[in-house]
Image (cartoon, helix red, strand yellow):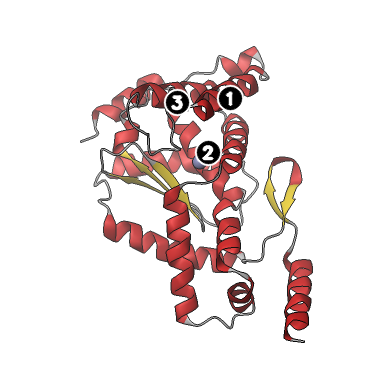
Amino acid sequence: MRRLSITLTVLILAILLSCATTGPGGKKDFILISDSQEVGLGQQFDAQVRSESKVLADRQWQNYFNDIGQRVVAVCDRKTIEYHFTVIESDDINAFATPGGYVYIYTGLLKLMESEAELAAVTSHEISHIVARHGVKRLQQALGLSVLIELVTGKSDSKTLETAIAIGLGVALSGYSRSNEREADEFGIHYMTLAGFNPKGATNMFEHMAAASPGKRNFFENLLATHPETQERISNANAKVRQYSADIRSRDLGKAHYTQMKARLP
Ligand SMILES: [Zn+2]
């Protein structure tokens, strides 16, 4: 009987909360965690990230990263939440997004890039993980049915929430699945191009990342020159970029401005 009522609850909730747009072209997915719950989790992740990392103390850089991010947000398929962009001072070659609209990039990764278009590519890729609810979907799977029902019906206690945060942050930091990465690469190139950037920034970025870590696994998406997945992602990106017109592919890459900004990095 209990099992039946749980099934029924899930069914009703699925009907009520299904069909969130999670990508270009009106792509939909079943999402049980609401925007406000996701944003609440995001705020807690953010507090944890800030307590464990050093936020770059350069207003100009934080504003620059935010400007690039907001340009992409303005054309993405999920504008109902606020997005926050933070540069973290660390030599790690890394960038990540957590559920709820939070995107972080490390100065170690910024130093490897050579243009604004590359920065837009990484930013757009991370925004795409949020649009596609990759973290939320992993969270839904990891939490299990009963916890999810508690969360969705508002009956969750603080312990449930703590568990959710721990899992969510773990998921966000451990990287997404291969198919999630493929999707974020594809959406990312689409959104950055819509926002007016040169999509070649994406392929340039992949090549720089792959070349920068010949001997060790690169924490940013595990890009590695000899890794078959990296090669596949580079060739997929190249194929997607080639579909754009010559005009779009010859847009300014923003090298001059980026070089100035890069010189400011500690
Ligand atoms: Zn990714």
Task: Identify the amino acid type marked 3.
Answer: Met
Picture coordinates of residue 266, whole percent (x, y): 20, 36
- 156 to 239, vertically: above or below: below
What secondary structure is marked by label 2? helix
Q: How far apart are the alpha carbons under marks 1 and 3?
A: 10 Å
Within 10 Å of disc 3 (Cα), the crowding (few <14, some 14-19, many 20+) is: many
Q: In this view, does 107 lie above or below 103?
A: above
Q: Which residue is drawn at 72% across and 66% down?
A: 17
Of the image marks 1 and 2, the number of the one nearer the N terminus? 2
Which image quarter is the N terminus in? Answer: bottom right
Q: Determine crowd level at label 1: few under 14, some 14-19, many 20+ residues with C-alpha closer than 10 A.
A: many
Q: Name the residue under label 2.
A: 125
Marker disc for residue 205: 3
**Mark 1 touches mark 3? (CB < 8 Å):** no
Inspect this view and state whether residue 115 appears.
no
Q: In this view, does 89 lie to the left or right of 240?
A: left
Q: Is mark 3 on a helix, strand or loop?
A: helix
Where residue 87 appears, as percent x and y from the top left, is 34, 44
Secondary structure of residue under mark 1: helix
Q: Tell me if I can see residue 83 in this picture.
A: yes
Residue 247 versus residue 100: which sits nearer the camera?
100
Along the viewing direction, whichever of 209 and 78 lies nearer the viewer: 209
Q: Estimate the spatial distance between the alpha carbons at disc 1 and disc 2, rounded to whole Å.
A: 12 Å
Mark 1 residue type = Ala
Q: Mark 1 points at which residue?
A: 237
Mark 1 or mark 3, which has the lower sequence index?
A: 3
